[in-house]
Image: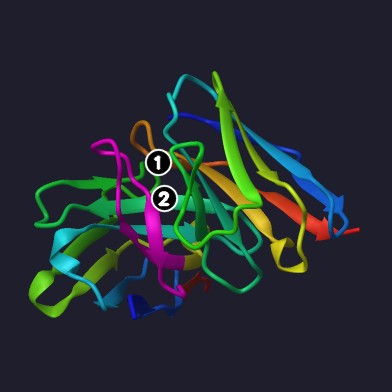
Amino acid sequence: DVQLVESGGGLVKPEGSLRLSCEASGFTFRSYTMHWVRQAPGKGLEWVSSISSISTYIYYADAVKGRFTISRDNAKNSLFLQMNSLRAEDTALYYCARDIGYGGDSPLFDIWGQGTMVTVSS
Amino acid sequence: DIRMTQSPSSLSASVGDRVTITCRASQSISTYLNWYQQKPGKAPKLLIYAASNLQSGVPSRFSGSASGTDFTLTISSLQPEDFATYYCQQSYSKPVTFGQGTRLDIK
């Protein structure tokens, strides 16, 4: 089965750090651009970051730029999100998602993990 | 950033009803518009891509269309499993942006 499984979420104090992981299985991970998308409690979806198949292209939402770092290890079929200087507004369920794309560089998310919850609170 | 505005924000309907949800982009995005369904406690599921293309495995009662910067998701005959929240997403330019969601409830 094609699957994404996130881990690493938890409760962290403001200004703290957390590293999220996403393990892929059932597909050729190294062939796909991958993304992180988050959802604050009771709110909508917000794109966070993306990384191309061999890490050539990396993008961040303005809200996390300079604080979050996306990376991947294709040998281990894993995606990561290092989150530093966390704020209360970063509290959300963080999903990793596979990008099958179309028409060139047009992100399209066909596979999502179940999410890992990050809570930033003192 | 391109702003995506969905209407209505919530909607009550009955099994068998025909339902239409609208998404408006703040600028032209051609047909780079995708629709997702999210049920409580679950990850989003891709329904339609490029405005009108049905994702594999999605029932044919779902359809999408485009007119300028306005996009519609139509469910021709609501089934019990269709009650969920629906999101549009533009993939025309970075950053990717989503609509605020439309919650579809049972009347």
Q: Quadrant of the N terminus of chain B?
A: top left
Q: Which residues are magenta?
A: A94-115
**Residue that mark 1 sits on:** B96
Tell me what residue is drawn at x 40 percent, y 41 percent.
Answer: B96
Q: Which mark is residue A47?
A: 2
- Residue B13 vs A106, above or below: the answer is below
Mark 2 packing: few (<14 Cα in 10 Å), some, or many (20+)?
many
The circle on residue A8 is: none
Image marks 1 and 2: residues in contact by CB distance under 8 Å: yes
Q: Pick the residue in front: B95 or A31.
A: A31
Q: Is residue B12 above or below residue B65?
A: below
Q: Is residue B66 in view from this perspective?
A: yes
* Label 1 SS: loop
Residue B100 seen by the camera: no
Q: Residue furthest right?
A: B107
What residue is drawn where x is 52% and y is 73%?
A122
Q: Amino acid at mark 1?
A: Val
